[in-house]
Image (tube, grey):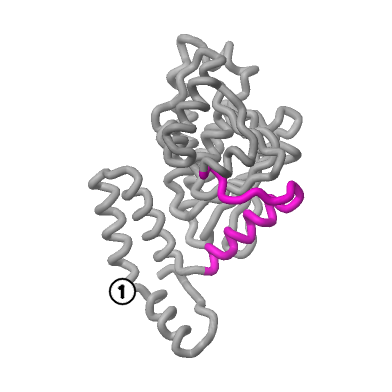
């Protein structure tokens, strides 16, 4: 489910009776949706949340016998990884608004987001070891970047659950806010992002990615994006707005 307002798209995982467990079809849809939103010049930030009282219980275990068995598990993992990548590589920042359970693949989606806001009742877990599964390597990179290597080891080795306070202390989440304010707070942050110069935000997102990855190609993409800002109409608008003591009106060009 998607709604759009003021340059912000809100994507809601909408299977509340299943704690927003992610079916194979939904993995595929998430990839398509985030790629579509990322390609839209009208969208400047994305909020990702879950319907009802939970973010997501992760991949839908009811499908595992038929769609994640020995003969087809690799194809299923490919769909998982593509969804994580679509969130991670979105052109605009993604803010995850988390209530209740955030487990497994749901945890992976949240870790792939740029920012995470959580309710006091949020619970985080990566239970792959309890199911005899391996977590996708690319998604593990997101978990390490979001929570740090020590917490990543603890979560994946033990399958333990941590609460919002522990997640905050680990740096996994940015803030804890009252349950009924989680989505509003995430939307407020997204609106603040949307009001800024899109090319500048993109340059920052790519520079942070390069700093974390240490990959030369990422550093070059960040350099190109940063250089583009200096010739942009938005840079001229930002200077003009500062001189004229008014709010800038950025176009993304």
Magenta span covers which residues?
171-195
Residue 231 vs residue 120, the one in the foreground? 120
Residue 38 vs residue 17, the one in the foreground? 17
The residue carrying pointer 1 sits among few (fewer than 14), some (14 to 19) or many (20 or more) residues within 10 Å by Cα, namely few
Image side of residue 116 versus residue 144, left or right: right
Q: How many marks?
A: 1
**Residue plotted at (31% across, 67% down):** 228
Image side of residue 109 versus residue 224, left or right: right
Image side of residue 182 versus residue 66, left or right: right
Instruction: Say if residue 11 shows up in the picture.
Output: no
Residue 96 vs residue 71, the one in the foreground? 96
Image side of residue 48 versus residue 37, left or right: right
- In which image quadrant can residue 13 be found? top right
Q: Secondary structure at mark 1?
A: loop
**The N terminus appears in which quarter of the rendering?**
top right
Residue matched to label 1? 231
Residue 152 colored in magenta in the image? no
Percent x, y of residue 132 = 51, 13
Percent x, y of residue 137 = 39, 28
- In which image quadrant can residue 67 be found? top right
**Residue plotted at (51% across, 17% down):** 129
Outermost residue on the bottom side: it is 244
**Residue plotted at (46% across, 10% down):** 71
Residue 178 colored in magenta in the image? yes
Vertical side of 131 occupied by 123: above or below: below
**The C terminus appears in which quarter of the rendering?**
bottom left
**Residue plotted at (47% across, 55% down):** 92
Vertical side of 212 occupied by 15: above or below: above
| Magenta span: chief secondary structure | helix
Percent x, y of residue 166 = 59, 38
Instruction: Say if residue 47 shows up in the picture.
Output: yes
């Amino acid at each position: 489910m998607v709604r759009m307002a003021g340059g912000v798209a809100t994507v809601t995982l909408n299977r509340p009776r299943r704690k927003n467990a992610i079916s194979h079809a939904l993995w595929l849809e998430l990839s398509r949706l985030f790629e579509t939103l990322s390609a839209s010049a009208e969208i400047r930030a994305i909020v990702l949340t879950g319907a009802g009282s939970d973010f997501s219980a992760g991949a839908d275990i009811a499908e595992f016998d038929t769609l994640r068995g020995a003969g087809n598990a690799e194809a299923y993992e490919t769909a998982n990884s593509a969804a994580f990548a679509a969130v991670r590589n979105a052109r605009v920042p993604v803010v995850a608004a988390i209530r209740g359970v955030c487990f497994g693949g749901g945890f992976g989606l949240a870790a792939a987001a740029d920012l995470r806001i959580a309710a006091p009742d949020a619970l985080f877990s990566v239970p792959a070891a309890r199911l005899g599964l391996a977590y996708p390597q690319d998604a593990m990179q997101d978990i390490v970047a979001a929570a740090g290597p020590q917490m990543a080891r603890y979560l994946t080795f033990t399958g333990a659950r941590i609460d919002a306070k522990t997640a905050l202390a680990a740096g996994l989440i940015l803030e804890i806010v009252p349950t009924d304010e989680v989505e509003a707070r995430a939307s407020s942050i997204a609106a603040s992002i949307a009001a800024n110069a899109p090319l500048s935000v993109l340059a920052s997102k790519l520079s942070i990615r390069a700093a974390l990855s240490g990959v030369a190609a990422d550093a070059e993409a960040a350099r190109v994006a940063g250089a583009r800002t200096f010739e942009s109409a938005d840079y001229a608008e930002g200077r003009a707005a500062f001189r004229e003591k008014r709010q800038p009106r950025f176009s993304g060009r």
